[in-house]
Amino acid sequence: MRRRLIAGNWKMNGSREALAELDGIAAAAGAAPDVDVAICPPFTLIERAAARVPSLPIGAQDCHAAPNGAHTGCVSAGMLVEAGEKLVIVGHSERRADQGETDAQVKAKAEAAIAAGLIAIVCVGETEAQRDAGEAETVVCTQLRGSVPVAGGDVLVVAYEPVWAIGTGRIPSMTDVSAMHAAIRADLVDMLGAERAETVRILYGGSMNAGNAADLLAVPNVDGGLVGGASLTAAAFVPIIEAAAG
Ligand code: PGA
């Protein structure tokens, strides 16, 4: 049985004052012992966040594939571990679009993260044009095969995030979510073998909120959520944790 994971992605949002939101989030996480909850703030808030709520796993939104070296502006997985991190998001569509990250780079980052002892959340997802062209499953499964390292269990998480659903308030139909998560699971079985593939959690991400979380989490193979906007406040995020616990 896979434990549900609800992970918040603060993106380039948050401040020291905003860390007060973590108190309510950590309390809700404590009241939901069967659900894993995590928050991924910007790099600059990681150490403070980890110190403020030691019971709540804190994650990052990216890491470099190399352990150290001449990579101005980058942060390695080992540095994240030292800062108190437990997990890291890699290959988010905003990084694939803004920084031109390729599947091979995403895979190298995920491998580095896992080697350093972090859980890697590998993101995949199609654009609206790709879905309209009937290419969504092909695009997502190609990303998956190129970006997912050969690892299973708790260390590997896949997040299906349709690009057109991120921050838009729109979500796919439950039928489409179900079909995509089943396709991802089938590909994971092919890549990792059935036993390992069954242990990998597949999150849904893209406009998940208090109103739709219960429906999304009831879809087979949806093992949790990667939540952007609705993770910024305890008021918005706690109902999603409760839906996962419910
Ligand atoms: P959203 O973002 O919940 O604000 O749509 C999700 C994500 O990009 O991870």
Image (cartoon, rainbow, N blue to C red):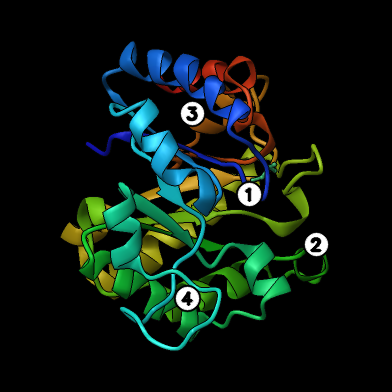
Q: Is residue 142 visible?
A: yes
Badge 2 density bin: few <14, some 14–19, many ≥20, Cα 10 Å: some
Q: Give the residue at x 60% y 67%.
A: 137
User: Which of the two discs, 3 and 4, sits closer to the camera?
Assistant: 4
The numbered dot on residue 11 is 1
Q: Which residue is mark 3?
A: 218
| Local secondary structure at mark 2 | helix
Whole-Å distance between the Cαs marked 4 and 2? 22 Å
> With respect to residue 5, does 73 lie above or below?
below
Circle 3 Cα neighbour tier, 10 Å, few/some/many (<14 / 14–19 / ≥20): some
According to the picture, the residue beneath numbered tag 2 turns out to be 128
Tag 1 near tag 2, CB within 8 Å: no
Ligand 1 under 8 Å from disc 1 Cβ: yes
Q: Position of residue 185 (x, y in %)?
A: 39, 58
- Name the mark on residue 106: 4
Q: Alpha-carbon distance for marks 3 and 4?
A: 29 Å
Residue 38 picture location, percent across and down: 41, 36
Which residue occupies 49% across, 31% down? Answer: 217
Separation of residues labelled 2 and 3 (CA atoms) = 24 Å
Task: From the viewer's side, name the closer residue of 120 and 150.
Answer: 120
